Amino acid sequence: MNPVRITAPSTPVVSLEDLKQHLRVLHDDDDALITSYEAAAVSWLDGYSGVLGRAVLSQGWQETFPAWGCFRLALPDVTAATVTYKDAAGTSQTVPDATLRFDGSAVIVDATGPADASDITVLYTCALPEGDLPAVVQAVKMLVAHWYVRRETVGDAALSVPFAAEVLIGSKRRKQL
């Protein structure tokens, strides 16, 4: 089953003030537009279905598995995880001895429990490491600036992502073997 985000980041990747400074915008007339561009850029980059294939800011995710074993989580950069299941009576239980293992860019959760368990669920928090965040922040600024200047689709230039942003994004994209 695909992961589901259960807790969104509490702050934007780039604040409105920082974006306006980057764009050299001194008025408030376009605040909603600039904010929507930031949200669109982050939506394109962030999470399981984003082009980065990883969470940009700290957020909570949930994955459900059919049986016990080693669970390979869909997102990397996990900082905490909890494994729960429903017992035969339908009561939710927590696995006390679940362990996290890091295998390259993958996170593997080792957990075992009763054979009659159902709805084995891993709740986890993940976010880019602090050292990787500046490149993503800069890419978001570049995307917002690109869309702010080119508001309508006209020719190939309006359709492409700026090369510098592509380079920054590519350097932080999750690579799976």
Image (cartoon, rainbow, N blue to C red):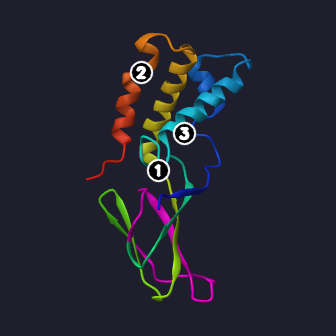
Q: Earlier in the sequence, mark 2 or mark 1?
A: 1
The reply to whether residue 177 is in sight is: yes
Within-10-Å neighbours for mark 3: few <14, some 14–19, many 20+? few
136 w.r.t. 96: above or below: above
Point out which mark residue 6 bears: none
The residue that appears at 57% across and 39% down in the rendered structure is 13
Query: Residue 34 location in percent, x, y?
Result: 64, 25
Judge by depth and name the residue closer to the eye, 84 or 96.
84
Amino acid type indicated by mark 1: Tyr
The residue that appears at 42% across and 83% down in the rendered structure is 112
Point out which mark residue 48 bears: 1
The residue that appears at 52% across and 79% down in the rendered structure is 118
The magenta stretch spans which residues?
Answer: 71-100
Residue 74 within the segment the image draws in magenta? yes
Query: Residue 124 location in percent, x, y?
Result: 52, 64
Quadrant location of residue 147?
Answer: top right
User: Mark 3 sits on what residue?
Assistant: 43
Query: Residue 122 location in percent, x, y?
Result: 51, 69
